[in-house]
Amino acid sequence: MNSKIPEDLIERVYQGKSTKEDGLLLLEVPPFELFRFADELRSLTAGDTVTYVVNRNINFTSRCVGTCGFCAFRTNNGKVLTLEEIMEKVREAAQANATEVCIQGGLLPDAGIDFYLGIVEAIKAEFPDMHIHSFSPMEVYHASRVSGISVKEALLQLKKSGLDTMPGTAAEILSDRVREIICPSKIKTSEWIEVVTQAHAAGIPTTATMMYGHVETLEERIEHILIVREIQKETGGITEFVPLPFMPYNNPVGEKLMREGRYATPGLEDLKNYAVSRILLHGYVDNIQASWVKLGKKLAQFALHCGVNDLGGTLMEESISRSAGASNGEAISVEELEWMIYGAGRVPKERTTLYGRVNELISGNPRRSGFRVSE
């Protein structure tokens, strides 16, 4: 085990030229030395501010034609929310001072682009200031296929109707070997990259995620991070990178792993993954987000010393992780989130989806400033 991070590796990181071999070597560095380096880079990039967004997740259906082996959310006969039911949830979000709604759902066999445009247009008609952060690359690809149009045309229509940003989900691990095992009917690596880069070209920024801890190798994890870096080099359209530990409960992939004696990733492995993500993406993706839903609140708090500078959203309802065995809740209050951040020795700041300052007035509701002072 290396007792020190090589100077030439550190130099490459600062130059934005770290390699796959560097990433693998970093995983062998003693954990707290690795964390210290990642924390140093976090400090240089984001300072001591830890951000979060007040948002609401809205999953419009669990019904899905997909066959992903890691999914515990999919059903064959789940309810599909009506547009009015979706709007009622948006109204509740606005009443709670949310600045963002994140809408995703299963793949309905007949849901073409008009289905998604209808949701976006209804929200913008009633709440023009509400940021719509919605529809995964898989959903956009599916909608374009159902409607018989190109991905580019689908994205341009969504942008025109009011879609602001997209979650970079459906990435899982960007390796076709892995995808053939865990989600053979899902978009391939090249197709995910195409949707995301086309979104950026259409003026729709995205996040980027990585679901790790199942059948992938360490090399494939590192390669995934470097693919995200290459996209960012080309487009600059990625707002944040979000590593997501695989939840092995209530799904076929996880049940097989547990029969083999492999359970959810150990916390130390999670923290190392966040740290390596910060290091390899240094100079390209400024924001590394930890999921308090998947990590748990205390581990997410410690991740703030391992390269993380963002804790995601308040969510209001998070049913996908819960169905896969997450036991950390579906929602968190701003007060508790800020308490966690202060407890880690950081300064909390509410942000917009695009990491801007929150306006004093959102959709007619007065709100506090982005910074809070503890009382």
Image (cartoon, rainbow, N blue to C red):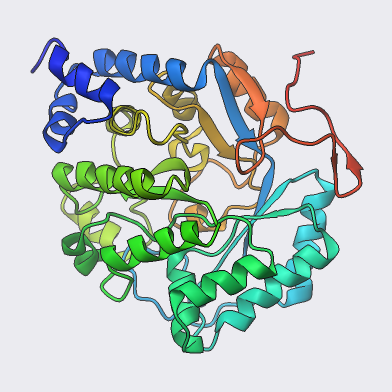
The quarter of the picture where the N terminus appears is top left
5 is higher (above) or lower (below) than 317: above
Tell me which corner region of the image, top left, top right, bottom left or bottom right, holds residue 333: top right
In front: 65, or 15? Answer: 15
Instruction: Decide if residue 296 is in sight here.
Output: yes
Rendered location of residue 334, percent (x, y): 70, 32
Identify the residue at horizontal 18%, vertical 48% (top origin).
220
Residue 117: x and y in percent read: 65, 75
Tell me: 78 left or right of 244: right
| Quadrant in which residue 175 is drawn | bottom left
Q: Position of residue 293 (x, y in %)?
A: 51, 42
Q: Is residue 47 left or right of residue 260?
A: right
From this view, report whether residue 340 is shown above or below residue 223. Answer: above
- Residue at horizontal 60 percent and vertical 47 percent from the top: 330
Above-or-below relation of 134 to 221: below
Of all residues shown, which one is farthest toward the left?
1
Quarter of the figure that contains the C terminus: top right
**Drawn side of residue 23 relative to residue 120, left or right:** left
Q: Residue at x 44, y 44 (%)?
A: 236
Query: Is 115 above or below relative to 324?
Result: below
